[in-house]
Image (cartoon, rainbow, N blue to C red):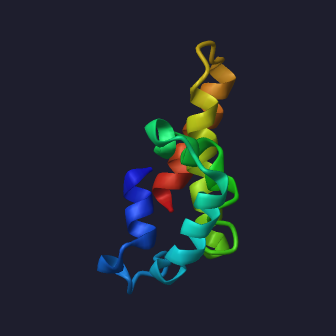
């Protein structure tokens, strides 16, 4: 999650099509309105805020890319994960890595 946020918002890779460093103020505004707890802010972004904060700031293709990663991680978090859920998460992660 930390790497994704860096790639999206740092000016180091501003020439990349997925980089939205020009949208950092809007994203910061949205996060500040949510007031995430500091101890779990990356986890909270991945599982909860990530569905709404980058939407409309990140181009749709990269938003959907991120959402496949987020869904995969969310699917694998419960203590009782079924084989079907593992298979679904694996497909999402493969899709994420291939893109």
Looking at the image, residue 76 lies above or below residue 1:
above
**Residue 51 in view, yes or no:** yes
Q: Nearer the viewer, residue 54 or 96?
A: 54
| Residue 58, horizontal then vertical, whole percent | 60, 73
| Residue 30, horizontal then vertical, whole percent | 64, 64
**Residue 91 in view, yes or no:** no
Q: Residue at x 68, y 67 (%)?
A: 55
Q: Residue at x 70, y 59 (%)?
A: 52
Looking at the image, residue 47 lies above or below residue 65:
above
Numbered-mark total: 0
Which residue occupies the extreme top position in the image?
80
| Residue 61, horizontal then vertical, whole percent | 63, 71
| Residue 77, horizontal then vertical, whole percent | 57, 26
Q: Residue at x 47, y 42 (%)?
A: 38
Looking at the image, residue 1 lies above or below residue 31:
above
- The image quarter in which residue 72 lies: top right
Q: Residue at x 38, y 83 (%)?
A: 14
């Amino acid at each position: 999650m930390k790497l994704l946020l860096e790639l999206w918002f740092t000016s180091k890779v501003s020439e990349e099509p997925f980089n939205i460093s020009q949208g950092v103020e809007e994203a910061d505004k949205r996060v500040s309105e949510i007031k995430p707890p500091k101890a779990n802010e990356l986890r909270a972004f991945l599982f909860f805020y990530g569905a709404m904060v980058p939407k409309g700031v990140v181009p749709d293709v990269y938003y959907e890319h991120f959402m496949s990663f987020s869904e995969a991680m969310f699917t694998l978090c419960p203590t009782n994960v079924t084989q079907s859920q593992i298979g679904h998460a694996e497909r999402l992660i493969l899709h994420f890595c291939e893109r």
